[in-house]
Amino acid sequence: MKTPRLLIAAEVDRAARTILAADFKEDTQIKPCNDPRHGDYQSNVAMVYGKTLSRNPRELAAILVQSIGETNIFHLPEIAGPGFINFRLRTAFCTQAINEAFVQGRFGIEPVAKPQTVVFDYSGPNIAKEMHLGHIRSTILGDALSRVSRYLGHNVITDNHLGDWGTQFGKILVGYKQHGDPERLKSEPVLYLEELYQKIHAASMTDPTILDQARAELVKLQQGDRENLDLWSQFVDFSLVELNKIYKRLGVHFDYTLGESFFRDQLDGVVQELLDHGIARTSEGAICAFFDNDPQLQDKPFLIKKSDEGFLYGTTDLAALQYRIKEWKADRIVYVTDGRQQLHFQQLFAVAHKWGISTDLEHVWFGTILGEDKKPIKSREGKPIKLRELLDEAELRAQAIIDEKRPELPELQRREIARIVGIGALKYADLAQNRNLDYVFNWNKLIAFEGNTAPYLQNGYVRIQSIVRKRPPTDHLKGPITLVEDPEVALGKKMLEFGDVLELVAIENRPHFLCVYLYELATLFHKFYEFCPVLKSEGQIRLSRLALCAMVADCLKTGLLLLGIEVLEEM
Ligand code: ARG
């Protein structure tokens, strides 16, 4: 079924086509009103067209409103401010729509008419380096975005583009050949490899011949030397075991983990193709793609082969891009990384464009997590915060709260609650931010049971479920729902926005819209519950309110799960 927003848009479009322009395309922006006193939805079409047609927007709005008139869906629209048109939904329409959505399931959201194949590239840590706080953003954002797209009906492929073929392996191989300790490699691979790397790196400062050794080991590896390849594949395999523990704790799953190494035999071909097409040329011994006609990238060539014959991060990305289009038939590829890689992706996409690739490519970038001092967050020792330790701390902090709140629960149950609350709180704190902004990390805020946090929403879900469970055994949850009181109507209207919100999240690649929505939904629920008795009301009213409760609970749960956050039945 169509959301109220889309139904209103159809009416506005019809009027705009007859009055403003026959070729009017559906570009009216219908948005929910910020202040419900002004109405439920708002259109700015009169202002946009007022400008292009040089006419008074309020006059245009009046003409449009006259043509739109009142309908079964909304009352006569009102004109506000410089020429906004405000719409207020009819309660009867909302009641009918909410029941339709309830019966249809999935909140009335139908799978997209034209599913796309969308590849999500996220997380992609470099092997032999512990995952730290910075990695959480890419992992969690990518996970949430891919879940939402999948829910909307797209064919989603997730791929962890692991950094498993970098120059760091030269030093690590030198280190391992000197101090190899198979036991440590097995028991704490990532920490150990990082240590080896740092040891050799430090040694190379005083003894430059070590760099030559490292380069030689790297070349041997790249040329397929058996011994080095065997060692390297052990490094990768053991590291993956460890990484997978983190992914498991985070509830993050990848359809593929191809990694950079997967493309190593395709790099020569990619470079050759770009040379043949005149996209790349040799410059000072290296090979670069140039963007001569692009004012922004004119002086920023994209290096794809170094003068020492080595390939680069970007070369691998080009090979991966080609592969995803050829093998997976990707219509859209979404890369989730740190904002510092913006230039890299601009260049990558510019090369792709010249290469004739029409797949929709998007770089979804995010800002930095800051400490209380507003500087990139560090541990007490001034080192990056390890993701593993961060997850431990989240669980421990949640555990302390749960132990205090629910001492009567069995230990095992308390631990499970703490896990779900702790990890959920951590994820939500990140997802609730507009991703382009830096934000200050604050344990107390993120784990609080009040405010826009995961524990608040998880708790809301638990409370609603417990109301529903306490109903008389003869009461069913089939409705029908009748929206009568104001808080009830407001809650119903909010639920009818769910489909719009998910679509917005998918279009803009911004999960925080969903967080805002869930927070508002939970808040509206609490208002409803304050004013509208559920279990204490009688007959049809009780059945209606119970069904409404069940629907809100389901919406909260679905929304949280789409963010990758689990819910509990009790906490
Ligand atoms: N390994 C990269 C890093 O740690 C992230 C990979 C992102 N994906 C990509 N296709 N470039 O920064």
Image (spheres, rainbow, N blue to C red):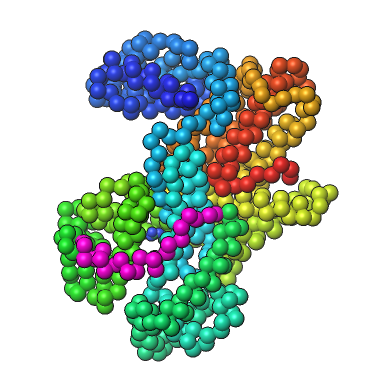
Taking the spot 73% from the left edge, 31% from the top edge, the residue there is 468
Is residue 539 visible to us here? Answer: yes
State the residue at coordinates (53%, 85%): 180
Q: Does residue 261 sit above or below 248 in this rendering?
A: below
Residue 248 place in picture, x, y as percent: 59, 58
Is 467 displayed left or right of 297 in the figure?
A: right
Q: Main secondary structure of the magenta part?
A: helix
- Residue 532: x and y, percent? 70, 22
Left or right placement of residue 187 versus residue 299 in this view: right
State which region is magenta: 252-274
Which residue is at 26% across, 54% downward?
352
Number of numbered discs: 0
Q: Quadrant of residue 518?
A: top right
Q: Quadrant of ligand 1?
A: bottom left
Q: Measuring from the top left, give residue 522's x and y in whole percent.
A: 62, 34
Foreground: 363 or 277?
Answer: 277
429 or 327, nearer to the observer: 327
Q: Going 50% across and 60% down the picture, which residue do you hit?
A: 135
Quadrant of the rendered structure where residue 305 is? bottom left
